[in-house]
Image: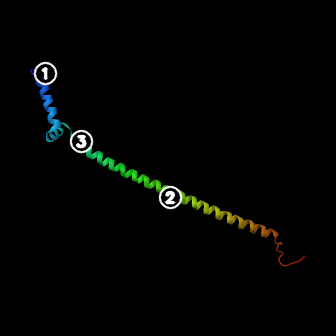
Amino acid sequence: PSGTSPDATNYCSDRCYTSLRWFIQFRDEVRRLILTEDVLALPSKVDRLVDAVRELADTQHQQAEQIRALAEARQRTEERLEVRRAALLSRRQRHIGASEMRPPNLGGRLS
């Protein structure tokens, strides 16, 4: 301010700084006067955001475990299907081989 000596300004600044630093109630009141409600609400919003991110990370971990379990189950199913396919193919080849070795059915007539 005009008309105020530098010493008086420094004194006020120093005193204000000391009051803000050491008097918690004064600092809280100044904070409420200077900062907007949105800025004052940031700590609780950040806490909620941290909780939400933690929940998402837990959910992602659970889903990764479920995907791993599903992949293992799929692998086991594919292995069982391969065994069954091989058995079916083997039976089919035996059946075809046996029918080729049988004499044709002539309907009981001899020519």
Badge 1 or badge 3: first in the primary sequence? 1
Measured Cα–Cα span from mark 3 to mark 2: 45 Å
Q: Neighbour class for label 1 at 10 Å: few (<14), some, many (≥20)?
A: few
The reply, left or right, for residue 76 in relation to residue 20 is right
Residue placed at 10% from the left, 21% from the top? 5
In the image, residue 16 sits, relative to residue 45, either above or below, namely above
Count up the numbered dots. Answer: 3
The image quadrant that residue 43 belongs to is top left
The image quadrant that residue 27 belongs to is top left
Tag 3, which secondary structure? Answer: helix
Q: What colouring style does the render use? A: rainbow
Residue type at mark 2: give it.
Ala
Q: Which mark is residue 68?
A: none
Residue type at mark 1: give it.
Pro
- Which numbered disc, 2 or 1, marks the residue closer to the eye? 1
Q: Which mark is residue 69?
A: 2
Badge 2 or badge 1: first in the primary sequence? 1
Task: Residue 88 in the image: state x and y as whole percent.
Answer: 68, 66
Q: Which mark is residue 38?
A: 3
Residue placed at 24% from the left, 41% from the top? 38
The reply, left or right, for residue 74 in relation to residue 10 is right
Task: Residue 83 in the image: state x and y as whole percent.
Answer: 64, 63
Badge 3 or badge 2: first in the primary sequence? 3
Residue placed at 33% from the left, 50% from the top? 51
- Which numbered disc, 1 or 3, marks the residue closer to the eye? 1
Residue type at mark 3: give it.
Asp
- Residue 33 visible (yes or no): no
Tag 1, which secondary structure? Answer: helix
Residue placed at 84% from the left, 75% from the top? 106
Measured Cα–Cα span from mark 1 to mark 3: 36 Å
